[in-house]
Image: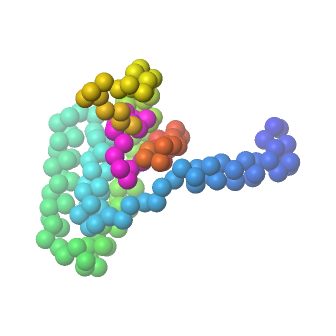
Amino acid sequence: ACQRELVAAGRVSRMNAEFRAAVAHFKQAPPVLTHSQKVCRLYKRALKTAYSWAVFRDRFIEEAEEIRARFDANAHLDPQSKKTELIIKKAEEELLDYTHPDPYVVPYMPGGTLFMRNAPVPYLAIYGENLPEGVEDVSINPDCSRVREGEKGTVGRVFIDYANKEMY
């Protein structure tokens, strides 16, 4: 009943629009990838998907060898050819079909059991403005990785989508 009242009052659509506007503020432009970067990321996603489905390590190794053989079979193709683009598109579609409904998440990443637990205290909170020699004040992402120039978190704010286990 509560949801119907909100819809009737027009508050749900306004809330959704405001939420989308807030997320748009945090989203960064997707990087322009080279062919080799696309293939490497596709390969990594294929291995992660296989790891989510494989219960035993020896089964995962067998699957990983099969995935590697499929990638090696097409390594000789020209990166700019239409056939290569078609193979990559079909591989992405196949990967989407095999996506696990509850994929394995590394514990310290968004959605993991250790995510944002016991985050390190910033050096400025410990030392104030007088950092000792050799101590470098570095920014860290919520997954405890260092912020590198041009990556997520360099703008000072990160939006965490817990439902989709993503960081923007």
- Residue in the picture at 19% in, 60% down: 70
Q: Which residues are magenta?
A: 140-152
Above or below, comparing residue 83 to residue 97 in the picture:
below
- Magenta includes 143? yes
Left or right? Give the position of 87 relative to 26: left
Q: Quadrant of residue 41?
A: bottom left
Pinpoint residue 133: horizontal percent, then vertical percent.
27, 27
How has the structure been colored for display?
rainbow
Query: In front: 22, or 46?
Result: 22
Above or below, comparing residue 5 to residue 126 in the picture:
below
Magenta: main secondary structure: loop
**Residue 120 visible:** no
Pinpoint residue 15: horizontal percent, then vertical percent.
73, 47
Pinpoint residue 131: horizontal percent, then vertical percent.
35, 26
Left or right? Give the position of 129 relative to 1: left
Pinpoint residue 22: horizontal percent, then vertical percent.
62, 49
Total labels: the figure holds 0
- Residue in the picture at 30% in, 73% down: 85
Q: Quadrant of residue 143?
A: top left
